[in-house]
Amino acid sequence: MNVEPDSLRFSRRYPEEGGDPVPIERYTSEEYFAREKDRVFRRKWLNIGNRLDAPNPGDYFVVELPVANTSLLVIHGKDGEYRAFHNMCSHRGAPLAWDEKGSCRGYMACRFHGWVYDTKGNLVQVSDSENFPSVEKAENGLTPVNCDVWREFIFVNLAEEPEQSLHDFLGPVVDEIAAYDFSGFTPAFHYRIDENVNWKTLQEAQLEGWHLPYLHEKTLARAVKLEGKQFRHSAIELHGPHGVLGSPPPDAFEPSPAALLASQFGTGTMQAFAKQRDPTEGYDFRGSFDFWHIFPNFFVGLLDGLYFTFNIWPVSVDRSIWEIKGYYPPIKNAGELFAREYSKVGLRDPMMEDCYTHELISKMLKSGAKSVLHLQDEEMMVRHLSNGVDRCVQGIE
Ligand code: FES
Ligand SMILES: [Fe+2]
């Protein structure tokens, strides 16, 4: 590691985050969870997709949001705008889109009785309309949800009137990431994991790299020769409720023979992770790999030549969905496909180690054996999330 030991460096930089243990009740209480749904998920901007989920006008996708008891339909309008709606027909409540993704030529018809909507959500045709004398088409379009786009990322806000614009909500993050070039990537893989764990426990394991040489000793840590060492972030920066974790380039990189073979055909995650950056080039990397956390539940991992995203969706107080999506340059030949697939399964193994651990933690948090959790300096982002959520729950933010 190139980072000098400097104990409590982040705690000294961010004294307002405090140093108290975190109450376990925040992970197990139904009442706390109910307040999170209201005070966080119904008020804050939430990422629900990428432009590439609906790249062309007429394309659409559906996102299940159990945290808000709804399912949203995002349509790339014929006019080029992205719009979000509750995925619910105005006649008798059937979903308008039944599949996760699709494309229409400008109109979508409900499968139940055929009412038709355009890509702006307007109701344009009522089947058997003479038998609906009091239904006004103009008043019975799809129910819209506030929707805005930042860079590649599509966000919604479930409040009737958002307290902030998406731009203001993202604050300094907009400028900090402005120089990263998201163009030229295609969706490369998608994992969806349904876990019996609170949504904060799930994402907290992604908010610190300190567990790498422990939990991932035989996977990630072995490849970068971290076994038996203490992992130190090259940077932790808090930007409003959001923040970034920088991971330093490793001192050594010893890929397995299969990983080495894959690396001869194309860039994999581990190779990108191990790469030294030129600090003068475009986006100012804090490390070889920058992991941005956008409050409350979205991550964008920036590497050189690829990026990936996490969305962590609460289902209940102790169940969550983890969506993992990777975006790579388009594949040009079979060798590159092999490298990409290898990179995909290379990520899967440490993810499985995380998932298994999450569920074990979740079980024990409910045991009542302890009332608090302890955090150290390298876990500053875990504290930041916990504090940020708690301020919302307490009504301070
Ligand atoms: S529920 Fe859609 S047309 Fe009847
Ligand atoms: Fe992990």
Image (cartoon, helix red, strand yellow):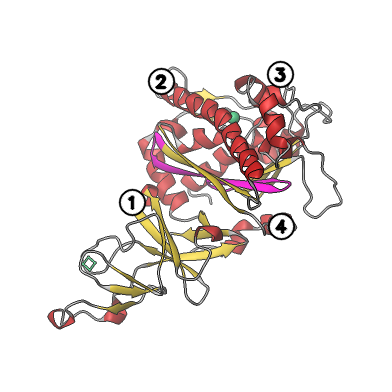
Looking at marks 1 and 2 on the same chain, the residue that comes earlier in the sequence is marked by 1
Magenta stretch: residue 54 in it?
no
Task: Indicate the amino acid at tag 4.
Answer: Asp
Identify the main secondary structure in magenta: strand
Residue 35 location in percent, x, y?
Answer: 41, 45
- Ligand 1 positioned in quadrant: bottom left
Q: Which mark is residue 227?
A: 3
Q: CA distance from mark 2 to mark 4?
A: 47 Å
Q: Is residue 136 left or right of residue 1?
A: left
Q: CA distance from mark 3 to mark 2?
A: 33 Å
Mark 3 neighbour class, 10 Å CA radius: few under 14, some 14 to 19, many 20 or more? some
How packed is label 4: few (under 14 Cα within 10 Å), some, or many (20 or more)? some
Compared with residue 38, is residue 275 higher up or lower down, i.e. above or below? above
Q: Secondary structure at mark 3?
A: loop
Q: Residue at x 40, y 40 (%)?
A: 33
Residue 175 location, quadrant: bottom right
Q: Nearer the viewer, residue 29 or 257?
A: 257
If you read the primary sequence from the N terminus, does the residue marked by circle 3 or circle 2 appear first?
3
Q: Residues within 10 Å of mark 1 (few under 14, many from 20)?
A: few
* Residues shaded magenta: 293-319
- The answer to whether residue 256 is seen in the rendering is no
Asked if residue 72 lies left or right of residue 308, the reply is: left
Check residue 305 for magenta coloring: yes
- Quadrant hosting residue 117: bottom left
The residue where tag 2 is placed is 368
- Residue behind mark 1: 69
Q: Which callout, 3 or 2, points to the residue nearer the camera? A: 3
Amino acid type assigned to the residue bearing label 1 in the image: Asn
The kind of residue on which mark 2 rests is Gly
Residue drawn at point x = 77 percent, y = 33 percent? 9
Q: Position of residue 181 (x, y in %)?
A: 71, 57
Q: Secondary structure at mark 2?
A: loop
